[in-house]
Amino acid sequence: MEFTKPVESNLFDNAKVVGKPMQRIDGPLKVTGTAPYAYERNDAAPDALYGYPLGAGIGHGRITRMDAEAARNAPGVRAVVTTLEIDPLEKGMNNVARLFGGDEVQHYHQAVAVVVADTFEQARAASALIEVEYEEGAPADLDLDAAFERVQGTGEPDTLVGDVDAAFRDAAQVVDQMYHTPGESHTMMEPHSSTVDWSGGEDMTVWTSNQMINWNHQSIATTFGIDQERIRVESPYVGGGFGSKLWLRADAVLAALGSRAAGVPVKLALPRPMVMNNTTHRSATVQRIRLAAGTDGKLTGIWHEAAAYCLPGGRGENATAQTPVFYAGETRRVKNHVVDMPLPETADMRAPGEASGLMALEIAMDEMAEKLGMDPVQFRIVNDTQVNPSDPDIPFSDRHFVECLERGAEAFNWSQRNTSPGGQRDGDWLIGHGVAGAYRGALVMPSGARAILDGGKLIIETDMTDIGTGSYTILAQTAAETMGMDVADVEMRMANSAYPVSSGSGGQFGAPSSTSGVYAACMALREKIAGNLGLDEAEFNGGRVTGGDTDMALSEINEEVSAEDAIQWGDFQKGYAMGTFGAHFVEVGVHAYTGETRVRRMLAVCDAGRIINPITARSQVIGGMVMGVGAALSEDMALDTGRGFFANHDMANYEVAVHADIPEQEVIFLDTLDAVATPLKAKGVGELGLCGVAAAIANGVYNATGVRVRDYPLTMDKFIDRLPAV
Amino acid sequence: MSPPIDFSLRRRTLLAGTAAAAAFSAVNRGGAAAQSSAAPAGPETSTVTLTVNGEPRELTVDNRTTLLDALREHLKLTGTKKGCDHGQCGACTCTVNGERINSCLSLAVMHDGDEVETIEGIGQPENLDPMQAAFVEHDGFQCGYCTPGQIQSARKVIEEIRAGIPSHVTGDLTAEIAITDAEIRERMSGNICRCGAYANILAAITQVAEESV
């Protein structure tokens, strides 16, 4: 199905299932512990032995010698494969660092060996017997601030509109500040895990934990130089990803090598302390933001320059992603720099770009509102735009940012807040309120599915994954709606490379893309059923097909009918800017004596097109808000600048938000429809929920204390000396 | 006030006192044993009898096997999850003799004769326990990986409050402890949910607590 023009009225406008709250269909399996994750495939590979990895102990350099003799002779050991024994493996899609092979160490905890043994304990103990000698690389400059100073002003701007220098020269008010965001770790609950059967050295089956079946499938083929047809990849349950499981990682590679060497299926999970440095993370950023505004509150100039780090060839984190499009303003200059550094690889983490960029930009907006003497909600409203301000011929497909701000302000009782910083007290707590705008691009990807009607049951096959986002449920809803059937009569078969290629889960493109793909497949199935019955026009409703003289239950169709299709996105979408929008409101308490910050109340208002399932969509948004609390107050990858690795590489020392950190949360979805976006008029929402949250908290801390902190996370050591006198 | 302890315990200092000398020789023996790893000092495996979800189970395990891996790898009860293997995340929470523990921080051989309950013993997909049903109803999870541990903790938190066991946020230690949002949040904080379903988990626990008065 080609999506060639904005959709007019269609069956989703009178939906019975889509858009209605529905509990997760995979819920009973998950709450009983019976959903099998990648390391638990006793159903498929009951005899899998245990793989255990060894990670490099230096930041970068070369391995000069490895001695695995003791490990090979250790009890229970079936095989040891060291990185020196094989040539560097080809890199899969978007891998920057090599995953295995050769003597080069590009980052700390890079995999250098795998041990296969009869038991987990034996494999782990044997891995510790492997001796590795290194030649360390030259000490590297890992100072991102210094790097920013070097690159600032260099290179062609990514976006340059109007005479930005004149705008700053003539402005009534100017903000010019530096902002810092730290490295962030996805810290999904399930570590990267795979069970692989490559025991024959030919066909390979990979039961893994991955967001993108097809990318993973291709990357495994590339890595090992074998035909994709010989490989099957399954990932029916994924214990969280947040971007860390978009790409092939060492768990699958090591399990495959171990399986071939030992001649048995092998399962391997990255030990938690290896996850942070072995896999990817969100780069720290240094950002300079300059804003110019007139007395009317309108932005006249926006200047955003940022730097992030990555291994050579990587993308780092583009904190300027939102700046060309989010706010109006006649002039702007935007530039992002990616600085090479020999650190663990940086790559996508939930809302890559916007999450870091809005942490800074939305503080800058608060600062400018204050300088102008404007309410920060009103200031954002004044600077709304309905066209891409960097390319004014391009309208937004559907943008209700102002409504997000207005609805949120009303629901949060914003007008009642204290407006003089440090002016509200509740016992020992200074109380503050903060707001931030939220923006995240609305991407779509081609997505396919197969729909099979079999004895009154509808089976949907697609390689789409459910990483906790609710794909199983919303795809079943979409299929049921399109076929006029009950959700109970839909069986979802997902996340298997044997099924049609979908969008996969990432970039908040999963829900809008994969629901469209299922819609396309179901429409093809409808056409086939109608054709088989000799109907020119047919209606599908209540589990029946009607048309002409025909009125029959779908369960009366004895022969299995199957159809496959995929959604393809037409060029017309390029004539629009597509995004999702929101506003976050928070109330914080800052302890007057210690500077401890507690979030007391949170509200998000989201404009993301049709909400396919309000239950799962709300969970995505509150989950983003929780991640935003961590980003604001505690998450911080601690870099050992001498050795070039992140020292707090576990779940005790990298502090994500826990139950006690999270207050009452409210989410309001605007009932919007984006006819340009997808046939369902839907957009993703899972990343929007994170965007802007941390800045709203930082702005709340400012409102509570009068202390502006521009360096995340807002730990007390950064501002306790500036708190109001007590 | 005690005088400050001289804590620069060099080897020479250690050898000087008789108690310290004994300690040193013990360490030395341990070190020697570790070096000749081909000849372990004692048996490497042990047989333990556990009652798991009401059924007696006899297991022969490597002494290093955690209770978590005994459940997951030996008994194939994979509902109890391994998130960190270091007692940091709570995904491995199960109950031993009626109390919740991080099963990754406990060796199986320490539990001979103990009664263990895992998520599989609490309810099944067609026969959910009220807490499991409440988690589904309130969408108290997303990816599902921390969920069995959350549910195990959630059930015990209600019992612990009712048993009068105080927490960090309990105000009056002599009064009956109320089941408040703050008490639940505090006691659940050893169970991390990176998907951020905390508000929904709180709603599920509150509902079960209210219905089970």
Image (cartoon, grey):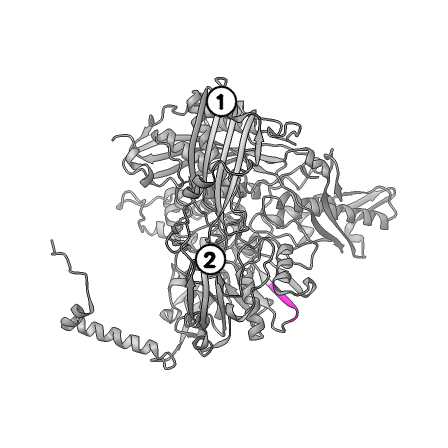
Q: Quadrant of the N terminus of chain A?
A: top right
Residue A628 is situated, as x and y percent measured from the top left of the image, at 46, 41
Q: Chain of mark 2?
A: A
A204 inside magenta stretch: yes
Quadrant in the rendering for residue A629: top left
Q: Earlier in the sequence, mark 1 or mark 2?
A: 2
Choose between B65 and A228: the one closer to the eye.
Answer: A228
Residue A399 is situated, as x and y percent measured from the top left of the image, at 61, 30
Magenta-drawn segment: A202-206
Choose between A721 and A267: the one closer to the eye.
Answer: A721
Q: Chain of mark 1?
A: A
Relative to B153, residue A689 above or below: above
SS under mark 2: loop
Relative to A58, residue A522 above or below: above
Residue type indicated by callout 1: Ala
SS under mark 1: strand
Separation of marks 1 and 2 at Cα, in angstroms: 44 Å
Residue at horizontal 56%, vertical 58%? A209
Disc 1 designates what residue?
A293
The residue sitting at the bottom extreme is B39
- How many numbered discs? 2
Disc 2 designates what residue?
A107
